[in-house]
Amino acid sequence: MYKRQIHHPNGTLLEVDDFADINTLAESIGDQKVVLDARNIGASKDWWAQTSEILLTRLGINMEKQTFPISIRPSSPQGGITTDEHSRAISGKWSRWFTGLYAAGDSACSGLHGTGTIAGNRLLDALAGAVAAGEHAAEFAKKTKFPSVILLMATGIIIRILVSFTDYENFSFLENLIPVLGTLGLILIVLEGAIELEITVEGKGLYNITEIINQAISKHRISKGFCNLFIKHTSASLIIQENADPNVLKDIENYFDKIVPEDGEYNHNEEGPDDMPAHIKSALTNTSLGVPIKDKKLDLGTWQGIFLFEHRYKNYDMGIRRTISMTVIA
């Protein structure tokens, strides 16, 4: 590997890998001033000749004979907001999507590049991320209803304008409608309180998603009501089970594996040995659950938890993404 010839002013040579990260380089150099010594390259090198000429004509620095002072600083940002293949901003153990938020380019951490990203790759990453975000956002918008409460708010504003610019006595009844519209708006906010939860799991097993549901409920600011959950898949299910002893979950999984074995005689087997058993396990459990809400969270028993019961193995590095539709009613 090529070594950068970096010297202290006292002449001490520091050999640092050309691809060393900024922390390693800074640790090697310390707080002393350093110089870049490129005299051993020579102007005869084709790839270096142009750079050497520019430094000589523009800055008056002859890199064949002189050393060049350098400072250590990050050249570009790396990392950013964690995103998935749709450029959705995700967070948490199971890659939950912050609904409606996307990130691309330098603001995103897509996992496509390491710390040595070159400029061309960064541009392609930004373009690909932007396209993925736009396509997904368009599809998501098609499935999302326009909130009726916005229409009610617009109607209320129009009524207020009519009352202000016309004979108040003739249209005073319209102003009485504004509180009614406000009440209807609050009702519609609740009735249209359906959201989709995107949860990524690591293959077969039971995953406690109680806290994820409670966090979503808290956003609706509902103290008392009802929560309906519906999983949009035929190879995973939802169950309520004990949340204390993990052996309970192991026993449940082992029991279902025993009564629905993977080596059974199934007609549907194109998608692997775990596919048809997953469909049967889903049929034997639940695809939807209804739980009361109390004090802004699920009114579950002390030892109860809501679990996503995944019946399939993980077949790629990003895990298995499941979608749960959640409706909250006051």
Image: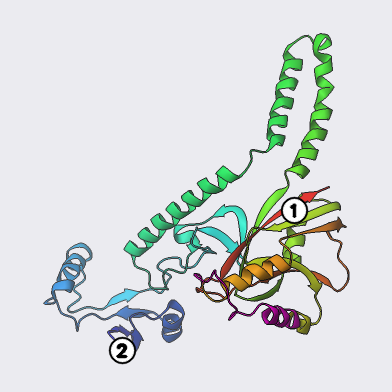
Secondary structure of the residue carrying numbered label 2: loop
Write down the quadrant of residue 250 in the picture.
Answer: bottom right
Nearer the observer, 195 or 21: 195
Q: Which residue is mark 2?
A: 11
By what rule are the colours in the image chosen?
Answer: rainbow
Residue shown at 70%/35% (left/top)?
148
Residue 213 visible to an observer of this rendering:
yes
Nearer the observer, 265 or 182: 265
Q: Nearer the viewer, mark 2 or mark 1?
A: 1
Residue shown at 18%/81% (left/top)?
41
Residue shown at 72%/65% (left/top)?
238
Q: Is residue 300 magenta?
A: no
Q: CA distance from mark 2 to mark 1?
A: 62 Å
Write down the quadrant of residue 282 in the picture.
Answer: bottom right
Specify whether 27 is left or right of 62.
right
Classify 98 as above or below 148.
below
Tell me the amino acid under the disc marked 2: Gly
Q: Position of residue 192 (x, y in %)?
A: 72, 43
Q: Which residue is mark 1?
A: 219
Nearer the observer, 66 or 140: 140
- Magenta residues, start to end: 250-271
Taking the view exactly as shown, the residue that stands out farthest to the bottom is 12
The disc, 2 or 1, on the residue closer to the chain's N-terminal end is 2
Q: Position of residue 275 (x, y in %)?
A: 57, 71
Secondary structure of the residue carrying numbered label 1: helix
Nearer the observer, 47 or 59: 47
Q: Position of residue 288 (x, y in %)?
A: 74, 59
Q: Quadrant of the N terminus?
A: bottom left
Tell me the amino acid under the disc marked 1: Lys
